[in-house]
Amino acid sequence: MKTQVVIIGGGPSGLLLGQLLHTRGIEAVVLERKTRDYVLGRIRAGVLESGLVDLLEEAGVADRLHREGQRHTGTQIAAGGEMFGVAFSALTDRHVTVYGQTEVTQDLYDAREAAGLRTEFLVEDVVIHGADGDAPFVTYTQGGSERRIDCDFVAGCDGFHGVSRKTIPEDVRREYEKVYPFGWLGILSRTPPVHEELIYANSERGFALCSMRNENLSRYYIQCDLSDSPEDWSDEAFWAELKRRLPDHVAKDLVTGPSIEKSIAPLRSFVTEPMRWGRLFLCGDAAHIVPPTGAKGLNTAASDVHYLYEGLRQFYETGESEGIDRYSERALLRVWKAERFSWWFSSLLHRYPEQTAFDLKMQEAEIAFLRDNEAQQRAFAENYVGLPY
Ligand code: FAD
Ligand code: DHB
């Protein structure tokens, strides 16, 4: 069969791109290795920049988000037993929306199904052919049968472990990576959030984050060892450790309860360049990873989708290839800024094994500067709410 765009990966990047292309009458098939339920079972991001919300609106899938999403106009930073706020809206006139990645993905799948768009689940052995020529095609197996789709373009939205990035020859690809010597242990619980804003905490026992999904669903994270596994941490041990990392006046308000999900995520900074090879375009985690501090992963995936959608739309509507030709350059310019912010914010809040007494003083001074200096707060707020596309 033939289509205009084959999208590899049915995560948020692939689904959002597919939905946006559909609004312009551009046909795409999504190939997903897992089932829809598996994709929706992954608890991940929770903080959406306004640019992503705008894209979801443009794709026609923002109704539930507007009903159920929470507008956050600031965040809290805790350190040394104290806490202070950074007021995004006062500093930048913008805000972020708390609405789970799971919900975004569900809304996108619902819209895709309602529009009768084609998604192939449980595909295996996906191979991209001829991306450096004029007639690319993708082969895969499904239920034991071999399949082939011819197309104009391939969008590689298949995450960090997908096949798309590896399709670009090694002598074309340049990869940059930093692996952090710790992970995040996260839990989801049906309890009211400890505070109306998110709390990012630096403590001598390591980082902690108090986040939420709604008024009775909380998401908490603590920095943990890479050798830990979720089974090592009983709910009681998790809550006790979280409390130790929060200022006393916050810890005393923490409502605990059974966890309904518990998982560990390693932390990594990673970028591959270029993000385009011929008719193959990488989007989202397929091209870059940020440590989760600062909530930039899903949001940076969305900015890639924006640039690629604009490029493809221009190509199909006018025949001009300027947008797709400059896709990699435009996307990477913003990607590196998100990498910088996530790396900086991670370095501000975590305990690193090799940290010296001097390094700890630098962390303290940097946090004090953020607390006391409005220009620094504004720079923080501009990055947190999302740099312009
Ligand atoms: P993915 O979500 O990885 O989707 C890729 C899809 O491709 C998957 O469904 C996969 O099954 C499929 N696939 C893989 N290989 C193949 C193949 N060969 N063939 C077909 N399909 C394939 N980001 C934020 O912005 N804010 C946050 O608050 C935040 N918090 C996070 C917390 C945690 C604990 C974690 C782990 C991540 C967090 N992120 C956050 C990052 C965010 O979740 C990711 O950046 C986002 O999922 C990227 O979307 P994607 O569609 O590019 O990739
Ligand atoms: C969440 C995750 C993050 O990485 C972050 O910075 C903020 C919130 C979350 O899952 O809610």
Image (cartoon, rainbow, N blue to C red):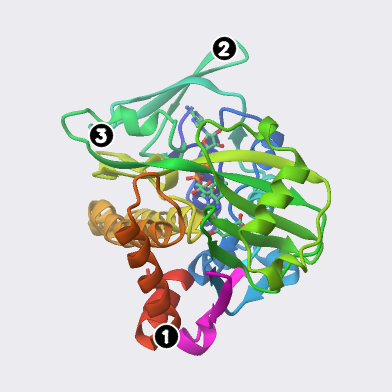
Image quadrant occupied by the C terminus = bottom left
Q: Nearer the viewer, mark 2 or mark 3?
A: 2
Question: 10 Å neighbourhood of mark 1: few (<14), some, or many (≥20)?
Answer: few
Work out whether residue 75 or residue 314 is closer to the camera in this orientation and state it: 75
Give how far across and how far down residue 184 sits, in percent.
55, 45
The residue that appears at 34% across and 56% down in the rendered structure is: 339
Rendered image quadrant of residue 63: bottom right
Q: Specify the farthest residue to the left.
A: 171
- 161 lies left or right of 75: left
Mark identifier at residue 145 = 2
Rendering quadrant holding ligand 2 = bottom right
**The magenta stretch spans residue 127:** no
Mark identifier at residue 289 = none
Give how far across and how far down residue 375 sits, in percent.
35, 85
Magenta span of residues: 79-97
Sequence-wise, the earlier of marks 2 and 3 is 3
Rendered image quadrant of residue 76: bottom right
Work out whether residue 42 or residue 34 is closer to the camera in this orientation and state it: 42
Give how far across and how far down residue 238 sits, in percent.
70, 46
The residue that appears at 65% across and 75% down in the rendered structure is: 71
Mark identifier at residue 372 = 1
Q: Is mark 1 on a helix, strand or loop?
A: helix
